[in-house]
Image (cartoon, helix red, strand yellow):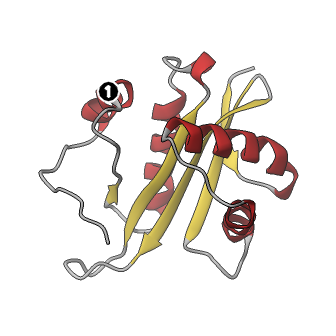
Amino acid sequence: MPLEIRPLMQADKAEWHRLWTAYLTFYESTLPEEVSNTTFERLLSADHPDQNARLALLDGRAVGLVHYIYHAHNWKRERVCYLQDLYADPDVRGQGIGRALIEAVYAEADANGTPSVYWMTQEFNATARKLYDRIATLTPFIKYQR
């Protein structure tokens, strides 16, 4: 079966949770279960139309996820799209899963009239950065957080 990228559905909760937990582990993070449950519900809720998710399925098996958020931008008339989370199972990396998920977000953003898509990654994420360098432009911004 070919790779399929599709919207997240309620029936995906167990597989989404598995991928989400692996993603958090990769970034050496943990979240309370209530936060993960809230995130999943927001990604599906009509009350949160700016929060979106897609799953990547390979041979019918969930192997990746992407979350993206639309928001206003003070330097643009149109809204922008923040690709917040991207993850592919380690055993399928190098097979185009991450690229397909990013391209799905690009297509959704274009259809939404939102030409600007941006994301951040940690400096040590060298493997992902090789992909990002091919499909996007690295900016000189440095992130600060309170």
Residue 97 in the image, given as x and y percentages of width and height: 55, 29
The residue carrying pointer 1 sits among few (fewer than 14), some (14 to 19) or many (20 or more) residues within 10 Å by Cα, namely few
Q: Residue furthest left?
A: 140
Residue 62 in the image, given as x and y percentages of width and height: 74, 34
Q: Residue at x 62, y 57 (%)?
A: 31
Q: Decide if residue 62 is on the left or right side of residue 3.
A: right
Q: Residue at x 68, y 71 (%)?
A: 42
Tell me if I can see residue 110 in this picture.
no
- Compared with residue 77, is residue 6 higher up or lower down, i.e. above or below? above
Q: Decide if residue 14 is on the left or right side of residue 46.
A: right
State which quadrant residue 135 falls in: top left
Q: Residue at x 27, y 41 (%)?
A: 136
**In the rendered structure, which amino acid carries the disc numbered 1?**
Ala
13 or 36: nearer the viewer: 36
Residue 26 in the image, given as x and y percentages of width and height: 52, 35
State which quadrant residue 125 falls in: top left
Quarter of the image for the C terminus: give it: bottom left
Q: Decide if residue 9 is on the left or right side of residue 63.
A: right
Q: Residue at x 73, y 46 (%)?
A: 16
Q: Look at the numbered disc 1 and give the secondary structure of its residue.
A: helix
Residue indicated by mark 1 = 126
Q: Decide if residue 131 is on the left or right side of residue 32.
A: left
- Compared with residue 72, is residue 95 higher up or lower down, i.e. above or below? above
Tell me if I can see residue 63 in this picture.
yes
